[in-house]
Image: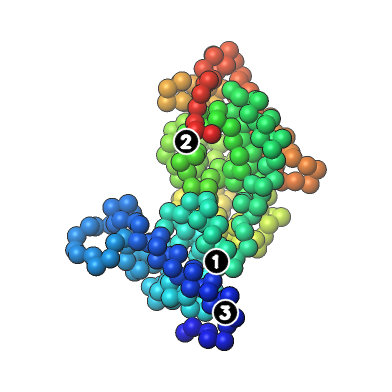
Amino acid sequence: MKNVNARPEVRARRGEFGAFLKSRRARITPEQVGLPTGGRRRTPGLRREEIAQLAGVGVTWYTWLEQGRDIKASEQVLAAISRTLRLDLHEHAHLLTLAGVTEPSSATECKAVTPSMKAVMAKLDPYPVIVSNARYDILAYNRSYCWLMGDLDAIPFWERNLLVQSLLNPEWRARTVGWEEHVPRMVAGFRAAWAEHLGEPPWKILVTRLTAESPTFEQLWKRCDVTREPVTDRRFEHPTAGPLTFHVAHLNVGVRSEITMSTFTPADENTASKLPTAACRR
């Protein structure tokens, strides 16, 4: 039930929140999310019950959200709804603002990627460079890293996570030589960092999701292996350039910062000769 005693600005924000959800729902077709297209639809887009099912929430509860009722949505639920509605970076941030939720850590940390860091990354082209945090969120990358791993610009920002892509993106797996050895090391590094972030929603959300969607992660997570040794050598199988080998150097941005800039230097002349002069849209 709506809270008539709420401040006018609160009621207005809830109304805007519901209207925003409806507008984003209306633009998604059943084909886009793998649902059957049969039957007449009175309004464009998906039905409320379809969004609720895809996001893993109750139909009544989601309906109340669209109606602007006085209910709270967790960051985990909002992330699921955001993925279902295929919101982009700005739309996702707008959704969180309307819901009164603090900006997610990954978006905040993106602001820590300073103009000088971006300038360094651009100057290092054609060497691939990536900036990430302890949760393996991808905060920034140059055009050569985009060429190496595929078009990251096309991936929604909340999906730009090294673990998510390595475990759930077949293209990343195909490009990663020694995937069976590399992923356990990544999970062990994540597990070591996890100890300093117990109880933090973004970390719990990621573990919950990967446990549900990746049997490999579930098995590795149960092993409780940990490591803090960074990977210093990487091999890839590029779809057009073929085998590539790199030495990887990691630079921590600040004494206590968990943000790391990783540079990929060609390990041999063959790799150096194949690096691109142009890559993704960045």
Q: Amino acid at mark 2?
A: Asp
Q: Are marks 3 and 2 in contact (CB under 8 Å)?
A: no
Which residue does the numbered mark 3 point to in the structure image? 8
- In front: 213, or 250? 250
Q: Answer yes or no: is residue 56 visible.
A: no
The residue located at (69%, 38%) in the rendering is 115
The residue located at (67%, 47%) in the rendering is 111
**Looking at the rendering, which quadrant does residue 72 occupy?**
bottom right
Which comes before the other along the chain, label 3 or label 2?
A: 3
Tell me the CA gap for discs 1 and 3: 14 Å
Viewed as shown, does residue 196 lie left or right of 159? right
Q: Residue furthest right?
A: 255
Residue 81 picture location, percent across and down: 45, 62
Q: Amino acid at mark 3?
A: Pro
The residue located at (61%, 43%) in the rendering is 139
| Colour treatment of the image | rainbow
